[in-house]
Image: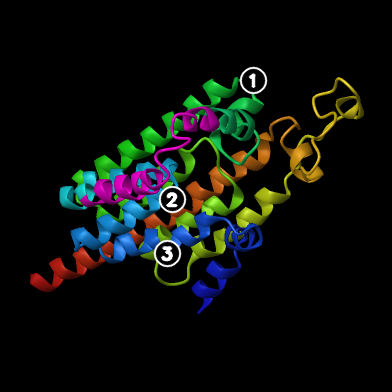
Amino acid sequence: MRCYFLALTCLPVVSGLIWGNVVLLLTPFVALAWRWRDNALRAGSVIGVVIAAEPVLWPLMFWPIATRRYKTCGFGLLVALGALLLPWAVIDFDGLASYPELLRAANEVYATHSDSIATMASAIGADAWKSTFAAIAIGLVLGSGALLAGRAGRDEVAFAFAASAAILGTPIVWEYSYSLILGPLAMLQPVFGVSWALLAVFVVAQRLPAPALDAKDLEPGGVACCPPEGIPLVSWYANHAPPSLWPALAYAVATALILGTAARSHLRAVLALRRDYARDAT
């Protein structure tokens, strides 16, 4: 019950409920991918649905590839492509040609003003595209960790690495995006432990100081002057303020601490079971 309570009341979940973001709905699908890991059609279908809903979560595919679940990977790709292309086909692919430009504009605005690796890079001086590349590079590094763990037979660790890559390897990450770690966390440590208590670090991350706009920024000619009609002022000012280094860094550190601690506890439990088995066998 303690784990359920902490999961439902942690900051990423509460934030997702407040904002009504689709990522929160995808969190159970990530958990189901692990639950149905021995059924290629089911696991692949839920992974495909997740990627179709949020294409930036494609690093989840590192897990079935790492663990040689190639049928799962194939089903996932088919479902993702079908779920992406069929709605476009209904409207004769209207707007498809302009979609990359929309993604580019969203990346330039939000990648440097979210809770991502890209925001961290931007805060220390990188431009939007270098910041985006930094996030993708981290995702590829974590994906490589999934591949190594999977080839070594560490299925659970590979799954955790892939989920981490899907979060930290995305240029635009909001606080509710970190709810995706709950599936790997519950899998690695199904009972209450230190890693579950570390979910509170997200609250600390959210409360860290962030740079604010100066008065001159709000004057005519300033970067935040003259918000368009109908745009909430809170969103306008937040997306025109300088990038926030410390909150973004704290979110990344919290993710590493939570999943790293859970993976350590899991591996220690596995080794203990092996020692007990070896002792009983002799």
Can you identify the residue that label 2 sits on? 53
- Which type of secondary structure does the marked residue at label 3 adopt? helix
- Which type of secondary structure does the marked residue at label 1 adopt? loop
Q: For the residue marked with disc 1, what is the amino acid?
A: Gly
Disc 2: CA contacts within 10 A as few (<14), some (14-19) or many (>=20): some
Q: Is residue 147 above or below residue 109?
A: below
Label 1 vs label 3: CA separation?
A: 37 Å
Disc 3: CA contacts within 10 A as few (<14), some (14-19) or many (>=20): some
Q: Which residues are magenta?
A: 75-103
| Residue 214 visible in image | yes
Residue ranking furthest to the left: 282
Tally the numbered discs: 3
Asked if the stretch drawn in magenta spans residue 85, the answer is yes
At x 64%, y 20%, the residue is 125
**What quarter of the picture does the C terminus occupy?**
bottom left
Examine the residues drawn in magenta and state their main secondary structure. Answer: helix
Q: Is residue 25 above or below residue 69?
A: below
At x 58%, y 27%, the residue is 121
Q: Position of residue 154 (x, y in %)?
A: 25, 52
Number of the label disc, if any, that sits on residue 74: none
Task: Please name whichever residue, 246 or 54, is drawn nearer the observer in this view of the structure.
Answer: 54
Q: For the residue marked with disc 3, what is the amino acid?
A: Pro
Q: Earlier in the sequence, mark 2 or mark 1?
A: 2
Can you identify the residue that label 1 sits on? 125
Q: Is residue 43 above or below residue 74?
A: below
Number of the label disc, if any, that sits on residue 28: 3
